Amino acid sequence: ARLAFYLSDFKLLFPQRLPAGDGGLSFGQGVIAAARALREV
């Protein structure tokens, strides 16, 4: 009950379209790299 109280402000995200674990992390890193590359142009 205490944990639920402290975590009530957080939104939990679950992988639905991306693979869980390293695959999702790699995708996120790719998105960040692409955004940085586009910002430099």
Image: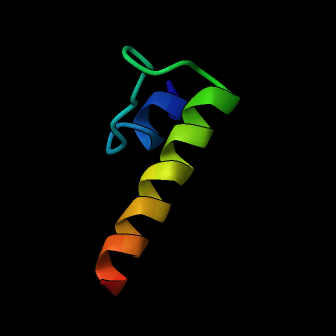
Instruction: Report whether 39 appears left or right of 30.
Output: left
Q: Is residue 21 above or below residue 28?
A: above
**The one of 13 and 29 positioned closer to us in this rendering:** 29
Q: Is residue 20 above or below residue 8?
A: above
Residue drawn where x is 40% and y is 31% of the image? 12
Q: Position of residue 31 (x, y in %)?
A: 42, 52
Residue drawn where x is 30% and y is 83% of the image? 41
Residue drawn where x is 49% and y is 46% of the image? 28
Residue at far top of view: 16
Residue drawn where x is 60% and y is 40% of the image? 25
The answer to which quarter of the image holds residue 14 is top left
Q: Is residue 30 above or below residue 8?
A: below
**The one of 41 and 33 positioned closer to us in this rendering:** 41
Q: Position of residue 15 (x, y in %)?
A: 44, 20
Residue at far right of view: 22
**The one of 31 and 5 positioned closer to us in this rendering:** 31
Q: Position of residue 13 (x, y in %)?
A: 39, 29
Instruction: Report whether 18 appears left or right of 41.
Output: right
Give the number of callouts: 0
User: In this figure, which colouring scheme has been used for the structure?
Assistant: rainbow
Q: Position of residue 35 (x, y in %)?
A: 35, 66
Residue at far front of view: 41
The answer to which quarter of the image holds residue 11 is top left
Instruction: Report whether 30 appears left or right of 17.
Output: right
